[in-house]
Image (cartoon, grey):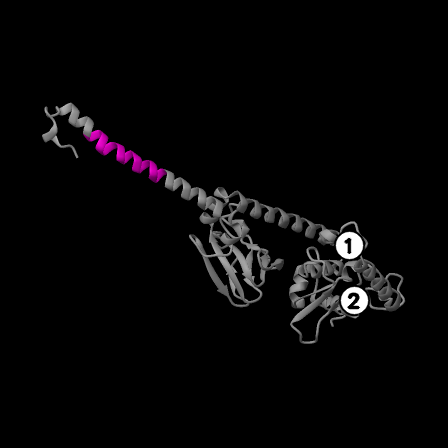
Amino acid sequence: MWNFSRVSKPPDTRQLCAILSIAIIRPRAQIEDGLIQGSTAQMTKQGHAFNPMTFLSTVGDGRSMMSLRKGQAIYAQGDAADALFVIQKGKVKLGARSQAGREAILDILSDGDFVGKDSIAGQSCRTASASAMTDCSLLRIEKKAMMLALTRHVKLANIFWAYVLARNIRYQQDLVDQRCNSSEKRLAHILLRMAHFDRRGARETTIAKVSHETLAEMVGTTRSRVCFFMKRFKNSGFIYYGPKGKLLRVHRALLAFCGQSFPSLGERHQDSGESRSARILFARVVRVKGLSRSGHPGSSSPFSTQTSPVYPDV
C-alpha cells in the first residue's frame, strides 16, 4: 500500500496506472502460470498412472459392470453396435444365423476376451449374436469411450489391436481346418483350444463340459457324429468325463492324435518327456484298439480321415 502522506509530490495519473499494473496484473499472471503448470503436472501424472488392465476391469466414464445369467442374451444379430464388452468371468457364445434360418456357433469366449469388436470396426449393426453360456460378469464400454481411449493411450491400443489380429489369425486357421480336415480332427482341435493347450504346459486340463449339440455346431457336423467321436476319445484315454458330470478332462495325449503340438516357451525345440509319452500312448492305442472310423477292429487305419456313411447315434 502506498502512503502518499510521505511523498512530497503526489504522483500523476500516468504513475498511478503503472502502479496499478504492477499491483494487479503481475499477481494475476503469476496465478495463471501456476494454474497452467499445475494442470500440466496433473495431466502428466494421469498419463503415467494409466493402466490398460485397470481400464478394462473397472467402472468409470462410459464403463459399467453387468451380470448375466446362463442363457441370457448379451445382444442379438442386427442390434445396434454401440458398445464393446470385456468378459470378467464366465463363458460367452458367439453365433450367427443365415437368411435360411441355419445357425452356427462361431466361437466360445472366456475371461479377458473382447465381445462385440464389430462396434469398433465401424459396423452400425451387430454381425453376430452373443449369449452367456454360464453366469457371466461383463464390463460394458460405450463405443465413444473406447474409441477415445484407443486414441489417447498407446498401451491400450497395442493390447486391443494385438488381440484382434490374433483372433483373425485364429479364424483363418479355423477356415482352413474346416476345408482340409475331417470332422473328427476338427473336434479334437476345438477340445484342445478350449483346454488352452496352446498356452499352457499342463499334462491335462479340466474345463466345463460343453453339450454335444454345441460342439456339433462348432465342428459343423451332426450330434450323432460328435457323440461317437467323444466316446471314442474317452475309450482311447484322450479325454474323460463322467456320465452326469459337469467337467471335461482333456489329456495332452490328444495332441498326438492331431499330429501337432503347442509347446510353451520353455518346451520349444525340446523333445520333452510329455511329448514322448503322448506318442507312446497314441501308438499303444492304435496297436491295441485297432479301431477305424466305422468302429470295426482290425482296420488298417485306426483314425482314418475317410468318411463313413453310417455313424451310430450313441
Name the amino acid, label 2.
Val
For label 1, the crowd category at 10 Å Cα-Cα, with few meaning under 14, some 14 to 19 and many 20 or more, is: few
Using the image as rendered, state which of residue 221 and residue 107 is in the foreground: 107
Q: Is residue 149 left or right of residue 191?
A: left
Indicate left or right for 13 with 36 as reference.
Answer: left
Lower position in the chain sequence, tag 1 or tag 2: 1
Count the marks: how many? 2
Any magenta on residue 33?
A: yes
* Number of other residues with Cα within 10 Å of mark 2, as a class: few under 14, some 14 to 19, many 20 or more: few
Residue 42's place in the image compared with 30, above or below, is below
Q: Are marks 1 and 2 in contact (CB under 8 Å)?
A: no
Residue displayed at 54% across by 60% down: 88
**Quarter of the image where the C terminus is located:** bottom right
- What residue occupies the far bottom of the structure in this picture? 244
Question: Which residue does the image show at 54% across and 49% down from the upper left?
Answer: 118
Q: Does residue 222 show up? A: yes
Is residue 217 positioned above or below 163 on the image? below
Which is the main secondary structure of the residues drawn in magenta?
helix
Magenta region: which residues?
20-36
The residue that mark 2 highlights is: 310
**Viewed as shown, does residue 145 lie left or right of 165?**
left
In the image, which is nearer the foreground, mark 1 or mark 2?
1
Mark drawn on residue 260: 1
Q: Is residue 84 visible?
A: no
Work out whether residue 46 or residue 250 is closer to the camera in this orientation and state it.
Answer: 46
Nearer to the camera, 137 or 267: 267
Residue 124 horizontal/vertical position (percent):
49, 48
Q: Is residue 283 left or right of residue 313?
A: right
Q: Residue 234: x percent and y percent?
A: 76, 69
